[in-house]
Image (cartoon, rainbow, N blue to C red):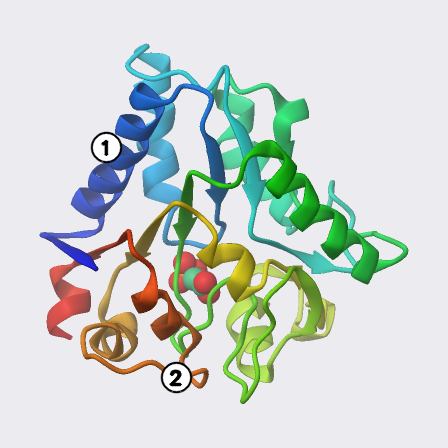
């Protein structure tokens, strides 16, 4: 694992964007794995700037997002499809028909998961996967459990996660209790992984990323076995 420590959130965001820009310069038709949440918002903002100033182009990019609430319509303002449109896709030269997010209204979520993994494999696999990290070490919606899933699947959200995400909904009762998420195997198949973490609240979990142990009770630790993992964090996160 390569660790990059930045002064603050803004620098972390720029550093992340730089790595994506490099990826797109080396391979303009990259398959990107993208993430939602508050952490990558600044990075997407920097990517929008780079695109507007013609430093990078998304014209040939295909993207697959990590997860989506279930059930939730793509045009709901808390859906991850809506998040991606408003934070990135609506503002850059990406072909939206080549941007994919699990279907939060799929009639058969198990089938949706299977098809999603097949589509990624048929596209050639993810070149660069962007990830945030939950305070409990969740990656996507792969929550701490004795057993984790390899493939994209429907999963229940823990009370912790529902609580953490309730701030975005009218009330806690409005937060969907399930999601379709890429599994740890789907994520680990990416050729390169970019993990972003910022702020004191992630200090404990980032500390667990820096020792030599892995455990399904902190799903992010499994990423340590990946051959090309970059962790970018800021000083507040590293030092607590
Ligand atoms: P956050 O969420 O970026 O809003 O902290 C990360 C996550 O829960 O995966």
Residue 74 can be seen, yes or no: yes
Query: Taking the image as four quarters, which one is ligand 1 found in?
Result: bottom left
User: Which one is in front, 120 or 68?
Assistant: 120
Write the residue at 34% across / 74% down: 221
- Kindly state the secondary structure of the residue where label 1 is placed: helix
Q: Relative to 153, is 105 on the left or the right?
A: right
**Image quadrant where one finds the C terminus:** bottom left
Q: Which residue is mark 1?
A: 18
Write the residue at 64% across / 36% down: 122
101 is higher (above) or lower (below) than 154 = above
Q: Residue furthest right?
A: 107
**Image quadrant where one finds the N terminus:** bottom left
Write the residue at 45% across / 28% down: 30
151 is higher (above) or lower (below) than 47 = below
Mark drawn on residue 215 = 2
154 is higher (above) or lower (below) than 212 = above
- Are the residues tagged 2 and 1 within 8 Å (C-beta)? no
- Whole-percent x, y for residue 201 in the image: 29, 73
Query: Which class describes the residues within 10 Å of circle 1: few (<14), some (14-19), or many (20+)?
Result: some
- Kindly state the secondary structure of the residue where label 2 is placed: loop
Q: Relative to 141, is 239 on the left or the right?
A: left
Residue 104 can be seen, yes or no: no
Q: Quadrant of residue 17?
A: top left
- Whole-percent x, y for residue 12 in the image: 21, 47
- Whole-percent x, y for residue 54 in the image: 32, 10
Q: Real-space Cα distance between discs 2 and 1?
A: 31 Å
- Whole-percent x, y for residue 10 in the image: 21, 44
């Amino acid at each position: 694992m390569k660790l990059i420590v930045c002064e603050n959130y803004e620098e972390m965001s720029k550093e992340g964007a730089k790595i994506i820009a490099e990826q797109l310069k080396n391979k303009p038709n990259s398959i990107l794995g993208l993430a939602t949440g508050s952490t990558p918002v600044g990075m997407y903002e920097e990517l929008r700037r780079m695109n507007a100033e013609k430093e990078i182009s998304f014209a040939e990019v295909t993207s697959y997002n990590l997860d989506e609430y279930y059930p939730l319509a793509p045009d709901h303002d808390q859906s991850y499809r809506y998040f991606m449109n408003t934070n990135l896709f609506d503002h850059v030269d990406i072909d939206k028909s080549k941007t994919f997010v699990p279907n939060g209204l799929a009639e058969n979520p198990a089938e949706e998961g299977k098809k999603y993994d097949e589509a990624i494999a048929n596209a050639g696999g993810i070149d660069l996967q962007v990830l945030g990290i939950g305070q409990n070490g969740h990656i996507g919606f792969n929550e701490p459990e004795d057993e984790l899933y390899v493939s994209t699947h429907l999963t229940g959200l823990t009370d912790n996660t529902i609580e953490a995400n309730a701030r975005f909904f009218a009330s806690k009762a409005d937060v969907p209790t399930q999601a379709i998420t890429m599994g740890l195997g789907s994520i680990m198949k990416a050729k390169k992984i970019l993990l972003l973490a910022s702020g004191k609240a992630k200090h404990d979990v980032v500390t667990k990323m820096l020792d030599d142990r892995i455990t399904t009770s902190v799903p992010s630790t499994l990423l340590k076995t990946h051959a090309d993992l970059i962790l970018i964090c800021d000083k507040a996160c590293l030092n607590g």
